[in-house]
Structure formats: C-alpha cells, structure tokens
Image (tube, rainbow, N blue to C red):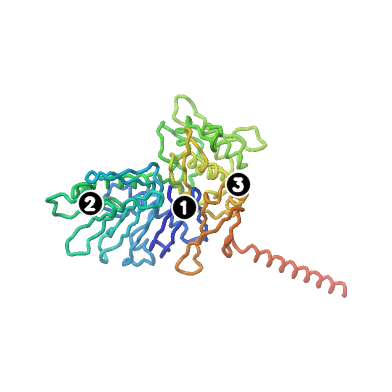
Amino acid sequence: MLRDLRIRNFKCWSDTGIIKMSPITLLFGTNSSGKSSIGQFLMMLRQTVDSPDRKAVFYTGGKNSAVQLGSYQDMVYQRDSSARISFDYTWDLASPLKIKDPISLKSFTGTQLEFAAVAGMKDEGANLILNEFKYILKDDEETALSIRMALRETLSPGYGVDAESYALIRNPGRAWYPKAPVRFYGFPDEVVAYYQNAAFVQELNLVHENLFRSLCYLGPLRTKAERLYSWTGTEPEQVGYSGENTVAAMLAAKDRKISFGYKQKAKPFQRLIAEELTKMGLIERFQVNAISSQRQEYEVKVSIKGSEDWVDLPDVGFGVSQVLPVLAQGFYAPRNSIIIMEQPEIHLHPSAQAALADVMIDVISSREDGSDRNIQLIIETHSEHFLRRLQRRIAEGAISPDRVSAYFSDVSKMPARLETLQIDLFGNIRNWPENFFGDDMGDITAQAKAAMEKRINQTSGHAETSNE
C-alpha cells in the first residue's frame, strides 16, 4: 500500500507536494485541473514495468495502453524539455524485507521502502535518461539502509553506486562502471558483478516490480452491456481498463468467498456483487447464466424493483452496466492491490452515488481466506454525494478518518496546487475550498433575488392593471 507520493514537473504539476495516501484516497477538482494526471503518472510507471524494453526510462503508452502521454515534451511541465521530472513514494511491504551482508554478516530488515528518481533529457533532441534513483529501506520510520545509483558527473562514462549503512565491497579486477539502469528503477546485472555483496539489489528490483504489478486501473468510460458474453475458462488479471473483462472475472471468481470484515459471514462472489447492487437501489436480483453446457457463452440477467421478470443487462438503466465493473474490480482484485478508478459514479443517480461510498468501505474492509485483502483505492471523482456519505460514515464511526485522504486540485492560480482536505472525527471538512462543488450559496442567493424581483414586477403589473 502506498503511504505517500510526490511528483514534480509532470503535466500541469510543478510540484504536487507530499500526497499522504490512505486506504481510500480521493482526488477532486474541476475539469482539466490535473487530478487525472496523478493516476496517469502511476499507470505510466506500471506500463513501463511491463514493457519489454528494459532500456526505456518511461513507456508513455501505445494503442492498447492504459495511458498515452506522448513525447517527453508533451508530458513535462510547461513543455520545457530542459526540465527534469522527479518523483518519490513510500510503500508498505507485504512482508518484511531482510537483507544480509555476506561479508560483515550484518542483517538489515525493513517493513517499508522509499524510492526516489530523477529523469530528463541530457541534451535537446537526445534520448531520455535516468539521472539517478535511490532506495531507502525503513523499519518503523527509521532508515535501515539506503543505496543510490546516479550518473557520474566526471568525464568517465557510466553510473556510480553508493550506499549508506552498508559497505559495498568491489570485486578485484572490475575496472568498468555499471551500465545504465533498467527502466526507471532497476539496478543492472553489472552492479552484482561489480561488487561482492550487492546481490540484494536484484531483490529491490523485484519488490519494486511487484508494487506496480499490484496496480489496477479502471477508466471513466466503461464498455456497454452485451446480451451474450464469451468465457473460455481463463482468469483475467483484472476487469480491464474499460471493464471489458468484467463478466469473465466474475465467472473466474465464482468459487471465491469474501466477507465485509472480521467475523462477518463470507459470501460467494456473484452473490456479494448482487447484494451490493441491491443495496445501491439499482436492481432486486442478479445472476450470470450459461446459455448451455455445449457453449462458452453466458448471459447476465437482472430484475428491477417492482418486477418479477428477469431481463438482459442491456435492458436496464445504463448506470448498472457502468457501475458493475467498479464493483467487480473492487472485490476481484488480488490481495494487496492498488486500484485507480476514474469517476466510478458516472451515470448513477445521486442516491446510488452516495451508496457507492458504502461499497468502497466494504472493499477496503473485505477479507478472504481468513485475512484482510488490504486493498487501496485511489479515486478521482466529481461526486458531492459520494463524499457526503463518507463524511457521514466517519461521523457514525463506520470508518476512521485516518483511512480516508481527500485532495482538491486548485488551478485558480498557477502553478496548480493540491490542497489537502482536513477531515475531522465528526466528518467535517475544516478547510472546505471555495466553490468546491460549485457556488451553491451564490445560486441560492441569485434565485432568491430573481424570485423577489419577479414578485415585485408581478405585483407592480397587477397594480397598474387595477388602476386602469
């Protein structure tokens, strides 16, 4: 789970400042305010990890990528190709990382990793290079060890490696310096060959890759409902960037059972999804049926309130098909996943938007096989109703305020600024931004003024008619 994140010189952000992350992290703001860029940056790192090109610092995307960011100039702040993009983040490890120096026999253990990197163009028109990156292994906020790889400033080409609290011992006869890093984060194999006791850097590479492979992304526009779905028995990694694998994921998860908290009864996956849709007031019943035992095709049937008839998914409101991938992804994602969602509330009635907040609380509270699923949600939303329900649940004690982080992207003045919303124990936002969800008070005042003027005009007109 990510604990914090900071990005500099990316898209509209000169500096996001430190973004403290929680199990539910919310990003608000007007259109084109930069809130989407934060999720885009994380997904760019994810697709870079997955890219077969180990030399490319960033893979900015192709036709089927989650994000497509174009050239370095397209994504650097103010399109200034001389500027460097830098970023850092800290995350909790799924299990403690133990490193033992084979020479000194000293052990180093940590439960968190901090990573920082700087990348930029060496010269105009040149390739993007990684200037430096650094890992810091932490235990209870204390540094256990750190190791850094950076481009040498001398005339000699190559990169240098240095560590703190860990004495790297060079192999005799190794005169050359290590080659360029792997992507934006990785120590190359030459580092292990160059030093007698640097084999642990490969584990750092792997742990980092595991972090980004835990990222799931669901975009704001989901695929429309179909009358028939094909499933060959495969298990998709996630529901897909547009929810295209939702039904396949639900079928693959048919034997999984999930509960909404400690000592809560575990429920079969499809039943759980059906109950959440019902609690949102969208349907009464839900099921996925095989067309026949001879075909690999399935249909999604639902019934709505006040009707006993089953109908196909395309025959109910569009909002159901749009929110189904949101629910499925939340409960389908593997343990320790980080799920990035854009506008999960899209096409939902206000009451359903509010109820969706309760679903998100269920997601981060869920357990499977007797242990917490440890899901983290990063949600970009425009929904006041979603936020209001979370505030209510905080006041009621259903969720602790330290499990929710909320930010408002403010572009009223440049550079853009990410303002932390301070939520107290009672669910109050102590620093509610001006015009956060529009100018409600201004609209109310303008309406009252217009109504008063209309009454005066009507009264005046009536008086003139009477005098005639």
Compared to 396, does 36 lie above or below? below
Residue density around tag 2, few if under 14, some if 14–19, many if 20 or more, within 10 Å: some
Q: Amino acid at mark 3?
A: Gly
Give the percent coordinates (x, y) of residue 21.
Answer: 46, 52
Q: Secondary structure at mark 2?
A: loop
The residue depicted at 16 percent of the width and 49 percent of the height is: 171
Q: Amino acid at mark 1?
A: Met
Give the percent coordinates (x, y) of residue 270.
Answer: 52, 33
Q: CA distance from mark 1 to mark 2?
A: 34 Å
Give the percent coordinates (x, y) of residue 303.
Answer: 61, 35
Q: Amino acid at mark 2?
A: Leu
Nearer to the camera, 436 or 30: 436
Residue behind mark 1: 21
Q: Of callouts 1 and 2, which one flags the residue occurring earlier in the amino acid sequence?
A: 1
* Circle nearer the viewer, 2 or 3: 2
Q: Of callouts 2 and 3, which one flags the residue occurring earlier in the amino acid sequence?
A: 2
Q: Secondary structure at mark 1?
A: loop
Q: Is residue 3 left or right of residue 86?
A: right
Residue density around tag 1, few if under 14, some if 14–19, many if 20 or more, within 10 Å: many
Residue behind mark 3: 397
